[in-house]
Image (cartoon, rainbow, N blue to C red):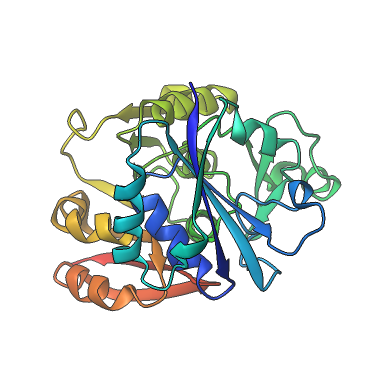
Amino acid sequence: MPFLELSLQCGQREHARIESALEELGALSVTFMDANAQTPDERAILEPGVGAMPLWQALTLTALFNADADRDGLLHALEALAPDADLSSAQFREVADQDWVRAWMDDYPPLRFGQSLWIVPWNADLPEEAAAMGEAATIVRLDPGLAFGSGTHPTTALCLQWLEGLAREGRLQGRRVLDVGCGSGILAIAALKLGAAHADGIDNDPQALAASIDNAQRNEVAQRLAVFTPESAPTQTYDVVLANILASALDELAASIAARVAPGDLLALSGILDGQQHDLLKRYGAWFDDLRVSQQGDWLRIDGARR
């Protein structure tokens, strides 16, 4: 199936907000490239490194949509969501089907989060540093497939760091975890490998649910992971809840997400751009105490305990 590609120029300061707007409009992937590169095809990145910004001052941003996406509608909506976007540079083209994420995985490095958690491509050798840690290292073997969640984006990295910190404090062992917007399953699987007893994942994308199950099998935790669409998800409470989704969805689903956290237990929210946290802190402050904000680059995590 072909896809519709939208490309436009932007500066380093605007890229995060435009990226967030494109994702909200249904972009299947967002790629950044040095606008001044002589050979741009070898300078692309799908997601900036952990805590990092693209190095280039002038960027070409490329977003992939379903082939039947409304071109004029996308531009009008992007203008409303990201007024600083330079739409005069916008160009559309049709592109052939390709497994974009798997092509990128060829250059995907193993990543460490906190003291002991490693996310390693399923087909990559274990880094020497991780191998030297022996049983002290927690290894998650990952193949994102076509689902979001590889660990390289700051929103995912912030959640992985939080989980690893809980595990070191002994606050994850034997707990029940809910991952709202599970994507590749990376957060739920990391929680299970770090000591959680069971995890449920929720996502409205069938590819995400399939990727989560595949990665759970890869990590030998499939018997402790269940995945659901939003309509079929259980309504029980959990000890630990993570929601790494867009800020607009965090706001819309606030009451539902809060209701899933057992009294006295823990919540982490991510997918939040700097500047979007103020309204969310007020919104979730109705249910949670001691809400804290952590930041990497332009992205934030909010975490706290249910009152």
Picture quadrant of residue 208? top left
Residue 48, position as x, y percentages in the image: 63, 59
Is residue 244 visible in this depiction of the protein? Answer: no
Residue 123, position as x, y percentages in the image: 74, 28
86 displayed left or right of 9: left
Residue at screen point 75% across, 36% down: 106
Camera-side residue: 186 or 73?
73
Camera-side residue: 221 or 20?
20
Q: Is residue 154 above or below residue 222?
A: below
Q: Which residue lies most toward the front here? A: 88
Quadrant of the frame with the C terminus: bottom left
Residue 260, position as x, y percentages in the image: 20, 48
Residue at screen point 68% across, 33% down: 103
Marker count (numbered): 0
174 displayed left or right of 35: left
Camera-side residue: 75 or 242?
75
5 displayed left or right of 242: right
Residue at screen point 31% across, 61% down: 247
Is residue 28 visible in this depiction of the protein? Answer: yes
Picture quadrant of residue 21? bottom left
Q: Is residue 277 above or below residue 68?
A: below
Picture quadrant of residue 127? top right
Camera-side residue: 4 or 175?
4
Residue 238, position as x, y percentages in the image: 26, 46
216 displayed left or right of 258: right
Residue at screen point 43% across, 22% down: 223
